[in-house]
């Protein structure tokens, strides 16, 4: 009941577009017209700019539409009125001023003091411009047995374009400021007559106020578009109107309370995160110290490996003595290998890679598999799969609504089929006695419970969900997200693949030594060959240890960078905490000054509010023509105000 029709939605959405388009005309008009004839041409300029914006709203077939153009001074005083209803009429201010249903008053203040538009031209300081709209058109209506003055309610969108070289820190009440760097497009909305009609002390305002810090004040004019059509289209005459109003008010209050609870929880969570940031920084410091120890240890290992290499030559001379210790030598080499593998396992775990524990037998296969999983295609598939699953989960959240819609459509088809089988149409059904209707309804319900219909519903639900998922996956936002996450992952993958390759090369180097040592023990009878293999293995081990040392140094440097960045992380959390506090406080203010005040103003008296809304919408419908004081059948009227420039 409270959802307005499509015309109302389009009208209200396009009002701001009209203001912006008309504002652009104001800039062009100033550039092209410097004489007093500029205002005489403004109607044509407004029409040319807004007709393509307004016309898509459309009128009902047969409707009579009027557009009234009001040319006003910088203070809002009417100078000329031009009426367009297929044939153009012009009225001078003296004859038109009393007929206009809406008056406009514009006031200016400079640094807190009132000033006229003429005096303000060329001045600098903090300027406040207030456009106040006053409804003159009303009817006496019965509201719960009492005669009340009910004004024609209007929605007004006001806007202008400000030169960024002269206007800074621009704000607008109940509206929006769009700054493209060189100029500010300002648009605000007011609802004159609405608060009076609904008897709300803190109701919607009847003015738009623009504030800015100005240098050499100049203004090309302010455009306002006013219409009562959106109020005429509101339907508050249904039998369920009162219940719907109560339910909407309760839901709005509950939603506001939930939103406030959520913002408070967010602030508390970020506060706790900020308090724990110190622990995080301590952990990073500990990791930094560990990386330093690893770097020192790898340097010592490199020194030891070099010593091992130097001793390989002496080992040849002692092979005969060592032959009785072959088993112990092989076990010692395996222990060294396992030590290296254990260190490699720690590095993999520290980098967040979950892989089987590396052993002498499987390390090459495992690391090869890791390298294969770090290709761009593999990462892209993983990112796509993750995003797809997330989109599917979001669609699944609406499964109940999808199922309800599908079930409703299927029920319509089954109902039509039952009527067709019975040889009757819907109008005949509606005129049947209740007993016969019940038989039809029972037949429909029986079919709805059949396995075939249930399967049809399930198939349609699945198809609709799949379609929604595919549509979402093709949206620019999702495609950009996939591309961004794939690019980010690709950078990490490239770096990780390099580290895996280096680690595998290090282990391969030691494995070559280890296998050489095994070959030596197996061929102890060939002591000379065994010694040569050991010497070669020692050289490879030295190269591997050198690579391992370089990696440890790089890891230490990375941890140093991470430690330096932790301070920035804590600062970021602090900023988030501050923002969450501002959000919480802002919602509290909005609730205290908006939702709560509205609920308090109603104080449960929904019957009176509904009665006032019904009277207001009827008065709005009655006013549908400017030229015909008694109104016309199915007519519409809208007003476009343009003020003169200030220079």
Image (cartoon, rainbow, N blue to C red):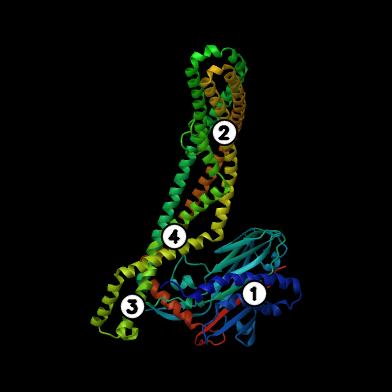
What distance separates the C-alpha of mark 1 from that of mark 3? 57 Å
Q: Which is in the foreground here, disc 1 or disc 4?
A: 4
Residue in the picture at 41% in, 59% down: 397
Is 248 left or right of 646, judged from the image as shown? Answer: left
The residue that mark 1 highlights is 642
Q: Position of residue 116 (x, y in %)?
A: 67, 67
The residue that mark 2 highlights is 503
Is 521 left or right of 107, judged from the image as shown? Answer: left
The residue that mark 4 highlights is 395
What distance separates the C-alpha of mark 4 from that of mark 2? 43 Å
Q: Secondary structure at mark 4?
A: helix
Q: Which quadrant does the N terminus fall into?
A: bottom left
The residue that mark 3 highlights is 415
What distance separates the C-alpha of mark 4 from that of mark 3? 29 Å
Q: Secondary structure at mark 3?
A: helix
Among numbered discs 4 and 3, the one appearing first in the sequence? 4
Q: Which is in the foreground here, disc 4 or disc 2?
A: 2
Q: Secondary structure at mark 2?
A: helix
Among numbered discs 1 and 2, the one appearing first in the sequence? 2
Q: Position of residue 126 (x, y in %)?
A: 65, 58
Among numbered discs 4 and 2, the one appearing first in the sequence? 4
Among numbered discs 1 and 4, the one appearing first in the sequence? 4
Check residue 549 in the rendering and tell me which mark sits there, or answer none: none
Please name whichever residue, 414 or 150, is drawn nearer the observer in this view of the structure: 414
Q: Is residue 546 above or below residue 13?
A: above
Please name whichever residue, 76 or 177, is drawn nearer the observer in this view of the structure: 177
What distance separates the C-alpha of mark 1 from that of mark 4? 48 Å
The image quarter containing residue 592 is bottom left
What distance separates the C-alpha of mark 3 from that of mark 2? 71 Å
Please name whichever residue, 256 or 174, is drawn nearer the observer in this view of the structure: 256
Among numbered discs 1 and 3, the one appearing first in the sequence? 3
Among numbered discs 3 and 2, the one appearing first in the sequence? 3
């Amino acid at each position: 009941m409270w959802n307005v029709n499509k015309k109302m939605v389009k009208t209200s959405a396009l009002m701001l577009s009209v203001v912006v388009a008309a504002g652009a005309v104001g800039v062009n008009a100033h550039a092209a017209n410097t004489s007093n004839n500029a205002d005489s041409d403004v109607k044509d300029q407004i029409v040319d700019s807004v007709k393509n914006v307004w016309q898509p709203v459309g009128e009902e077939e047969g409707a009579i539409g009027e557009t009234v153009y009001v040319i006003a001074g910088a203070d809002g005083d009417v100078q000329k009125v031009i009426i367009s209803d297929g044939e153009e009429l012009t009225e001078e201010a003296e004859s038109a001023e009393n007929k206009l249903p809406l008056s406009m008053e514009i006031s200016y203040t400079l640094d807190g003091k009132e000033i006229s538009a003429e005096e303000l031209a060329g001045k600098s300081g903090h300027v406040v411009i207030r456009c106040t709209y006053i409804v003159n058109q009303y009817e006496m209506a019965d509201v719960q047995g009492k005669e009340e003055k009910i004004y024609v309610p209007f929605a007004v969108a006001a806007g202008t374009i400000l030169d960024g070289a002269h206007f800074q820190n621009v704000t607008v009440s109940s509206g929006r400021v769009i700054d493209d760097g060189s100029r500010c497009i300002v648009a605000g909305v007011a609802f004159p007559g609405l608060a009076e009609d609904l008897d709300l002390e803190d109701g919607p305002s009847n003015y738009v106020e623009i504030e800015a810090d100005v240098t050499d004040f100049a203004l090309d004019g302010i455009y306002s578009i006013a219409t009562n059509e959106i109020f005429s289209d509101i339907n508050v005459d249904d039998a369920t109107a009162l219940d719907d109003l109560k339910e909407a008010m309760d839901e709005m209050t509950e939603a506001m309370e939930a939103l406030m609870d959520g913002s408070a929880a967010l602030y508390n969570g970020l506060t706790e995160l900020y308090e724990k940031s110190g622990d995080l920084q301590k952990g990073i410091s500990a990791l930094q110290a560990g990386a330093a120890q690893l770097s020192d240890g790898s340097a010592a290992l490199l020194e030891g490996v070099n010593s091992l290499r130097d001793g390989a030559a002496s080992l040849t001379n002692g092979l005969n003595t060592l032959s009785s210790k072959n088993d112990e030598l092989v076990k010692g080499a395996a222990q060294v290998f396992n030590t290296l593998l254990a260190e490699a396992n720690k590095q993999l775990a520290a980098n967040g890679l979950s892989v089987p524990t590396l052993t002498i037998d499987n390390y090459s296969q495992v690391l090869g598999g890791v390298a294969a999983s770090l290709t761009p295609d593999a990462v892209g598939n993983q990112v796509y799969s993750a995003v797809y699953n997330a989109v599917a989960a979001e669609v699944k959240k609406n499964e109940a609504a999808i199922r309800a819609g599908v079930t409703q459509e299927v029920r319509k088809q089954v109902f039509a089929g039952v009527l067709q089988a019975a040889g009757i149409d819907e109008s005949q059904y509606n005129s049947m006695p209740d007993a016969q209707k019940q038989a039809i309804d029972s037949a429909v319900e029986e079919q709805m419970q059949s396995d075939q219909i249930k399967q049809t519903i399930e198939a349609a639900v699945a198809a609709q969900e799949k379609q929604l998922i595919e549509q979402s996956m093709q949206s620019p936002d999702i495609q950009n997200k996939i591309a961004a996450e794939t690019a980010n992952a690709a950078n990490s993958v490239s770096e990780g693949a390099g580290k895996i390759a280096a680690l595998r090369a290090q282990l391969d180097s030691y494995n070559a030594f280890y296998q050489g040592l095994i070959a030596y023990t197996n061929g102890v009878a060939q002591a000379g060959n065994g010694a040569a293999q050991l010497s070669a293995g020692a050289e490879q081990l030295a190269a591997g240890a050198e690579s391992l040392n370089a990696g440890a140094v790089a890891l230490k440097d990375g941890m140093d960078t991470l430690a330096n960045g932790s301070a920035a992380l804590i600062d970021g959390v602090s900023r988030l905490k501050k923002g969450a506090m501002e959000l919480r406080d802002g919602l509290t203010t909005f609730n205290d000054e908006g939702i709560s005040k509205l609920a308090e103003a109603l104080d449960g008296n929904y019957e009176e509010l509904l009665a006032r809304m019904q009277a207001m919408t009827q008065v709005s419908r009655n006013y549908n023509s400017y030229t015909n004081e008694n109104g016309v059948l199915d007519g519409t009227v809208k007003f476009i105000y343009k003020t003169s420039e200030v220079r």
